Image (cartoon, grey):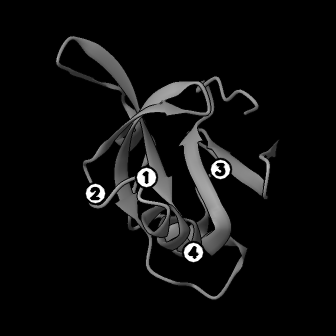
Amino acid sequence: MVKTDDANKVFYFVDADNIPEELQDRFNWDSFSAEIRDGELYQKVYLGYQEARMMREEKLFQNVGDRIEDFFGNRMIIADIFPETGTVLDNLYFVKVSAPISDC
């Protein structure tokens, strides 16, 4: 969990063995491979429905595939937004277990 000025942000650190059953049809371990764009390395982040909604309202991104240059200390690409589940999964950021997330 990372504390920001106005909220706590909860990260789900994904590895090959802990992909939530509800989301296994949406991504797999290989889905988290980093990408190089314009000579820079970007990690991928998958967003729960509610987190994506809030980030869009804050104008942090608009579409899947958008880049965020400083997302808790990382260059990130919005890899996907999960459909609403009505569970805690809607409020999570899903990142590769090796992504170094820093406090704001």
Query: Does 17 sit left or right of 71 as displayed?
Result: right
Disc 2/disc 1 C-alpha distance (Å): 12 Å
Check disc 2: other Cα within 10 Å, few if <14, some if 14-19, many if 20+: some
Q: Secondary structure at mark 4?
A: helix
Examine the image and state in which quarter residue 3 appears.
Answer: top right
Query: Does 39 sit left or right of 81 as displayed?
Result: left
Task: Report the residue that reaches farthest toward the bottom.
Answer: 86
The image position of residue 5, as x and y in percent, is 79, 48
Nearer the observer, disc 3 or disc 2? 2
The image position of residue 26, as x and y in percent, is 38, 64
Residue 18 is tagged as: 3
Q: Amino acid at mark 4?
A: Gln
Task: Report the residue that reaches farthest toward the left.
Answer: 38
Q: Quadrant of the C terminus?
A: top right
Task: Give the mark nearer the N terminus: 3 vs 1.
Answer: 3
Disc 2/disc 4 C-alpha distance (Å): 15 Å
